[in-house]
């Protein structure tokens, strides 16, 4: 699983191609171009030009780093005034405001955790039936932090990150007028078919959805890293095979987003007819999944840091994208999935 292709505009491609083709040409103005950050003119293919001041910046010299070429006009930090994102106080969000932000009922939000465990739910339902289960790896629901204060802090961090990106919270796939309609998202359209989430795992997913509605979120917080930008930190242990989150946002046709510079687009459906391919865009609406990093997949030793994968499943005949833990993850670790799930389209190995 990988996010959708990040389309470059023709202008960008030409701009880069020119520099790659003639890195040493002395009668080219670009030859005098150096990075404003490191002062070097090397790695020309990574040197971005500001559309306002025409100065250059290496993608890796920016903070946070840029993992791909921007589509369309790009302004350097000096010109955009966005030197670093302001780190506001998380305490700015009062509980009531937070409950509104996450669309959680107030009284539920204040109460201690009271959702019965999934095991209890299943036990109740299964009583009296003896079912021989074949051995298969099942998904687990995430386990929210017990401490309400901790949960509050986690939600504040998410609310802060979303609002500073001018986004609103949503845990769902949204269908809006002018974008792809709900009928467009049918898993049977997927080339080669899509794996169906088992009945048991669907139950687990629905249990997670119910928890989220009550304000019982996965034990995660969003942190801002000068180098990587927003990242997601694990705030309590997460077991292997846990459903961490469901990728949320607006569902749209890929063709509508070819010129879009949204940095969090996730493939949802790939059909025989490319004009019907769908993506999830977490640019206006979204949840914690849009802050999970796909960079830094590898450590210096070459071993993968990846601890999460994005998997597409058919649930009630529609496609969903789930973030699933690929191993036990300890408190304090950051979540990483691989942008290059199988497409190997982004050179993320550069970002070690
Ligand atoms: Zn540089
Ligand atoms: Zn500039």
Image: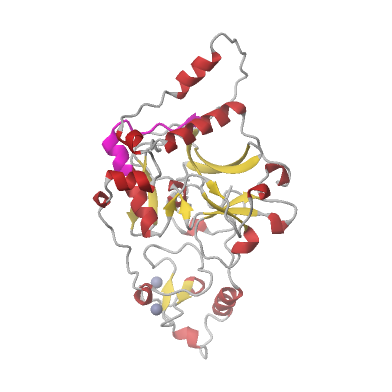
Residue visible at 43% across and 37% down in the picture: 212
Q: Is residue 146 magenta?
A: yes
Q: Viewed as shown, does residue 103 lie left or right of 179?
A: left
Instruction: Tell which of 71 and 124 is nearer to you.
Output: 124
Residue farthest bottom in this picture: 27
Instruction: Tell which of 47 and 138 is nearer to you.
Output: 138
Instruction: Tell which of 312 and 61 is nearer to you.
Output: 312
Residue farthest top in this picture: 128
Where in the image, quadrant-wise, is ligand 2 located?
bottom left
Give the x, y percent position of residue 72.
53, 73
Is 52 situated above or below 137?
below
Residue visible at 36% across and 54% down in the picture: 161
Is 110 situated above or below 3?
above
Give the x, y percent position of residue 158.
36, 48
**Highlighted magenta segment, given as a residue range:** 140-154
Q: Determine which quarter of the picture holds residue 20.
A: bottom right
Give the x, y percent position of residue 127.
53, 11
Is residue 223 among what the camera can see?
no
Is residue 313 among what the camera can see?
yes
Give the x, y percent position of residue 194.
68, 40
Q: Quadrant of the C terminus?
A: bottom left
Instruction: Tell which of 208 and 49 is nearer to you.
Output: 208
Residue visible at 40% across and 44% down in the picture: 103
């Amino acid at each position: 699983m990988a996010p959708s292709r990040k389309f470059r505009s023709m202008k960008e491609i030409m701009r880069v191609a020119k520099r790659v083709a003639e890195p040493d040409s002395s009668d080219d103005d670009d030859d005098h171009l150096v990075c404003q950050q490191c002062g070097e003119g090397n790695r020309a293919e990574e040197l971005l030009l500001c559309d306002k001041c025409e100065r250059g910046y290496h993608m890796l010299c920016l903070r946070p780093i840029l993992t791909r070429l921007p589509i369309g006009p790009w302004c350097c930090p000096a010109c955009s005034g966005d030197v670093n994102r302001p780190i506001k106080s998380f305490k700015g969000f009062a509980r009531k405001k937070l409950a509104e932000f996450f669309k959680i009922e107030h009284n539920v939000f204040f109460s201690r955790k009271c959702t019965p465990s999934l095991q209890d739910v299943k036990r109740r339902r299964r009583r009296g039936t003896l079912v021989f289960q074949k051995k298969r790896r099942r998904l687990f629901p995430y386990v929210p932090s017990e401490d309400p204060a901790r949960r509050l802090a986690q939600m504040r961090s998410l609310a802060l990150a979303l609002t500073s990106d001018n986004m609103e919270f949503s845990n769902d796939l949204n269908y809006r007028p002018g974008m792809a309609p709900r009928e467009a998202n049918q898993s049977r359209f997927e080339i080669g078919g899509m794996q169906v989430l088992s009945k048991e795992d669907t139950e687990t997913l629905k249990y997670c959805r119910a928890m989220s509605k009550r304000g019982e979120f996965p034990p995660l917080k969003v942190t801002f890293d000068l180098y990587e930008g927003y990242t997601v930190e694990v705030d309590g242990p997460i077991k292997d095979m846990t459903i961490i989150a469901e990728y949320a946002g607006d569902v749209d046709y890929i063709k509508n987003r070819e010129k879009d510079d949204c940095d969090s687009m996730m493939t949802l459906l790939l059909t025989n007819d490319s004009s019907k391919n769908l993506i999830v865009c977490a640019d206006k609406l979204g949840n914690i999944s849009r802050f999970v990093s796909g960079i830094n997949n590898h450590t210096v030793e070459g071993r993968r840091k990846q601890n999460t994968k994005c998997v597409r499943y058919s649930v009630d005949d529609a496609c969903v994208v789930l973030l699933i833990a690929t191993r036990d993850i300890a408190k304090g670790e950051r979540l990483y999935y691989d942008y290059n799930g199988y497409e190997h389209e982004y050179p993320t190995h550069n970002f070690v």
